Image (cartoon, rainbow, N blue to C red):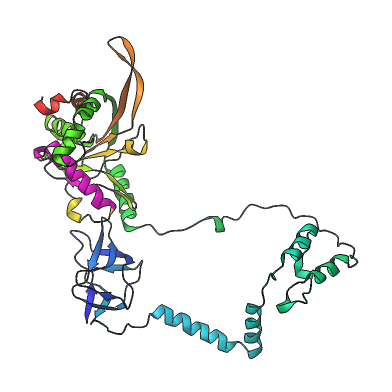
Amino acid sequence: MSDIIVPSLGESVSEATVARWLKKVGDAIAMDEPLVELETDKVTLEVNAQAAGTLTEIKADTGATVAVGAVLGVLGAAGAKAAAAPAAAKKEETKEQKNSAAGPEQVQTKAQAAKTPSDPFLSPAVRKIVDDNSLDTAGIGGTGKDGRLTKGDVLEALNAPKSAPAAKAPAAPAGPRSKGDREERVKMTRLRQRIAERLKEAQNTAAMLTTFNEVDMSHIMALRNQYKDSFEKKHGVKLGFMSFFVKAAIQALKDFPAVNAEIDGSDIVYKNYYDIGVAVSTPTGLVVPVVRDADVKGFAGIEKEIGDLGLRARDGKLGIEDMTGGTFTITNGGVFGSLLSTPIINPPQSAILGMHATKERAVVVNGQVVARPMMYLALSYDHRIIDGKEAVSFLVRIKDAIEDPQRLLLDV
């Protein structure tokens, strides 16, 4: 017999919430089989069985807050008898107490009520008479089997002399509708709480400002269409737009190092490495896994890593190390149809680039009005460390690289 323990949750994470049990008491467990999911303020992780056996007891139910080292449950030997579930035992005990407290007559009455249908079964002939005459069957005594209404019962009630209708009371004025049954209260997940804290922290701490520009996507779309099939055939991954923006951002970060820096007390920490965070939407909230050393990766390497991180994020398989240490973040609201937004900085970073939906718009090119696929770009930045001129120039640098993608290949 062995305890199922909350494992180490990563740096600065001391407790978690039991998201859900993947096994129930009495289930046979194989070694390394996932038993329970824990949710921290950063990731969702699985706790696996350290040995084969039987889940004999669950000590931390779904929704419970547990610290590192706490006992989640007990894993017994194969075929071990499961401990009785406290909640189920208590429920059964309460039911028996209620039955014993009720007198014999009360118990019998309840049994009879359970057997007698509240709405007696009506044959098609009886149902037609009832419906045609809008009869209320509740006031008609049934003489059929088990108290069911017969055609004779209904006709007799229909032909019986009707008493004068009682005076109808005036309708009370309708008051405001109750909101209680139209609201649902759900506890925030740890991840959602942490997202809320970090976003508010960014707004309270940074002198945040956003600058905008627009980029003509014609050339990058043409390049992608020309090489996407051969690219996928050679590298086994689709060529997307995100790798172009990651490469363009790295070029701009090298030209404007303050955008890749962070404030630490009274110091500015300039980072000469480029770990680019790519925001990913998951069912539990927004997470930002990091592409490490993106400056030394090619387009295929970046696309493969973004695809892998995105898949693991949606499956809840990211680790703490996958989401820490980023120097700059890119978020793409365009995949959801966003035309324009002001993204919030991911602290302690100093800037974030927002991509948006590509839409054909009328623009002036060489004195002619033409339709071009255009995207709005937004750069939110911390004005304490990045001046307006740097922010605007940084965004123009990205625009130039996207509109002339050969710059990315020649690093000019």
Label total for image: 0
Query: Which residue is nearer to you in this view: 379 or 265?
Result: 379
Prevailing SS of the magenta stretch: helix
Say if residue 348 shows up in the picture. no
Residue furthest to the front in view is 125
Residue furthest to the top in view is 367
User: Residue 318, position in %: x, y?
Assistant: 22, 54
Please state if 181 lies on the left or on the right of 224 as rendered.
right
From this view, report whether residue 316 is shown above or below residue 63.
Answer: above
The structure residue drawn at horizontal position 28% and vertical position 57%, both measured from the top left corner, is 41
User: Residue 200, position in %: x, y?
Assistant: 32, 46
* Residue 109 placement: quadrant: bottom right
* Residue 315 placement: quadrant: bottom left
* Residue 360 placement: quadrant: top left
From this view, report whether residue 363 is shown above or below residue 304.
Answer: above
The structure residue drawn at horizontal position 25% and vertical position 64%, both measured from the top left corner, is 46
User: Residue 326, position in %: x, y?
Assistant: 18, 45
Query: Which residue is nearer to you in this view: 373 or 388?
Result: 373
The magenta stretch spans which residues?
287-314
Look at the image and tell me in which quarter the C terminus lies. top left
The structure residue drawn at horizontal position 11% and vertical position 28%, both measured from the top left corner, is 409
